[in-house]
Amino acid sequence: MIKVFRAFIQKEIYHILRDRRTLLILFGMPVAQVLIFGFAVTNEFKNANIDILDHAKDQTSSKLVRHMTSSGHFNVNRMLVSEKQVEEGFRSGKTDLVMVIPTDFSKDLYTYDPAQVQLIADGSDPNMANALVQYARVMINDFQQQEYKEPANPYQVNIETRMLYNPLLESAYNFIPGTIALILLIISAMMTSLTIAREKEQGTMEILLVSPLPPLLIILGKVAPYAILSFIDAVLILVMGYFIFGVPVTGSLVLLLCLCMVYVITALSLGTLISTTSETQQDAMMKSLIGLLMPSTLLSGFIFPLTSMPEVLQYISHIIPATYFIEILKGIMLRGVGLEYIIFEVSVLLFMIVAFLTLTWKKFKIRLE
Amino acid sequence: MAAIEVNNISRAYGQVQALDAVSLSVEYGELFGLIGPDGAGKSTLFRILTTLLLADKGQATVAGHDVEKAYRQIRKQVGYMPGRFSLYQDLTVEENLKFFATIFNTTVEENYNLIKDIYEQIEPFKKRPAGKLSGGMKQKLALSCALIHKPKVLFLDEPTTGVDAVSRQEFWDMLKSLKAKGIAILVSTPYMDEAGMCDRIALIQNGRILQTDTPGKIVDSYPSPLYAIRSGNNYELLKILRDMDYTRSALPFGEYLHLATHANVSIDEIISSLDPADYPDLEVRPIEPDIEDLFLELSREV
């Protein structure tokens, strides 16, 4: 039996190595996805272009401008001379933020009158606009406190914020766990359902069925190579996350890898379940993309926070394996927790494995129909 | 006990009756041909016998095992070559053969003597991916793979479709040497001219077996005298002949018309019944019927 199993795996490895598309999906996609999420799709900003309309034109106002640019996050694009020029920059897309300093800025600041600075941002990109305004506001407050050493109002509440587990709010801390969950799902679930559907499409399943091979061995033989490959991918993404984006693994690495394996098995059992209901590769592909990949991307809490979703969508998110796995990953990698804190998520995944495998077992056909 | 025993097997796909009370039996060491056009139900019967489909009605045994209850036993003892080329196109000739040997718990070396004659012809290409072989070579490889575990019963579904004439002849020669080794072979083909290569044949159409016998006896059962007729204007001639009193049937066969008559009509009578001015180069000669004549005759009766 071991010999048969080995021959099966060897055959599967030939298939993978001889098909460039499969290879590309297996190893090109994880790398590309991590790099794209890491460098392009991010709410952080560096060198945002800021236009300044300085009505004051005195020492204090130029000090403020210097202060704004000192952070490295803002770049002075143009010094405007009139209100009319404000929109020009936004229209041409060269400006991200406009700061208007009033004539009395200096006087108001030092006479304890409320000094007003106007910030104008491009609302057509709300996330970016919010982030820019937030940041600029912090910088301006900062400047104000520097300028007069003691607080104007001694009863003022000073809010000090600390972002636990991700003090610098690096988006990599969010997308590395999310990407691992997605990639493992694509490779394990989609690729296995595709490769089993391919056997049906090419007619080789017919020959495999008319052989002494037990159905379980056919499935295991198809699935095992992908389990190993997905695991390699998980490690690859972790390594990239650590060395390129500085995402740490605070908790136990062994626990993390073990649970990666659990998730891979969940996804594989889902993939085999999909394959039992699809006759062609195209069919399997559509089912995996629409039924798996899309909900996992949108509803797992990877991109949009679960708590702000309508109730119906929240229910759906609870049946998506990726939701639980992302929680597990964040728990171990960022918060450094042990198994006792994520035992619920782990049990849900284990339960899903049993459920999917039982369904697959029930649906697997020992004949052609 | 017969290698294959089929009793009143019926099978429908929705409204279409693919097989209608089919019965036949094949002995060990016998080359049995299932002859019929596309859509006659040949592949459905193959799939029922190879345990891939269940029949709606009737029983069948293969190598002494019931096709429904003892499917595991059958799957160990039969070789199956589906109608469509179904090997791994991206694996080489050698890798395919080795893989199929392994999943049947044997090795290429163990049963090499069985496939030697066939495999030797494709051995020069053993490093080539199976998908890049020519039609004839693909079939030889598929046959090698179906034989590698020394099956007792061999099912070949249209093995010569899409294969050139020379390779087809070679293929049938191989089958003859295989049956000499005691293997029961059920082979299907849409080519009537291949029927003569089989020990016995069954003519099948629309899911029904029309007749089962040796090719010789089947041809002998042709009910009436037969003439081949040719002229410069076959189309007109066919219409005229069909209206004649002596005509049983008149059918076009390539460049000739085959005319079956009710009673013995002499050639002169046929010629004199036609206007010589219309058919200047008329040619009429008596011929022996072949399987195709009989097949058309039988399907005409149905």
Image: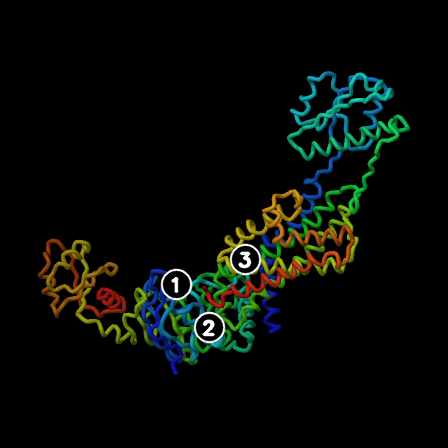
Kindly report the distance in space between the C-alpha atoms of the residues bearing marks 2 and 3.
30 Å
Q: Dividing the image into 4 quarters, which one contains the N terminus of chain A?
A: bottom right
> Quadrant location of the C terminus of chain A?
bottom left
Residue type at the position of mark 1 = Thr
What residue lies at 46% left-to-right and 61% top-to-bottom? B134
Badge 1 vs badge 2, beta-carbon distance below 8 Å = no
Crowd class of label 2 (few under 14; some 14 to 19; many from 20; radius 10 Å): many
Of circles 2 and 3, the one toward us is 3
Give the secondary structure at mark 1.
Answer: loop
Contact check, label 2 and label 3, Cβ < 8 Å? no
Q: How many marks?
A: 3
Q: Is residue A225 left or right of residue A59?
A: left
Q: Are marks 1 and 2 on the same chain?
A: yes
Q: Given the image, on which type of amino acid does mark 3 rest?
A: Ile
Vertical arrangement, residue A5 with respect to residue A179, above or below = below
Residue matched to label 2: B79
Please say if B41 is above or below A309: below
Q: Can the viewer see residue B178? A: no
Give the labeled residue for mark 3.
A274
Nearer the observer, A285 or B256: A285
Task: Give the distance between the C-alpha atoms of the residues marked 1 and 3, in whole angstroms.
Answer: 34 Å
- Residue labelled with disc 1: B161
| Relative height, residue B150 to residue B162 (above, below) | below
Q: Amino acid at mark 2?
A: Gly
**How dense is the environment of label 3, judged by Cα within 10 Å: few (below 14), some, or many (20 and up)?**
many
Whole-angstrom CA distance, mark 1 to mark 2, is: 19 Å
Could you tell me which chain the residue with mark 3 belongs to? A
Q: Residue furthest front?
A: A155
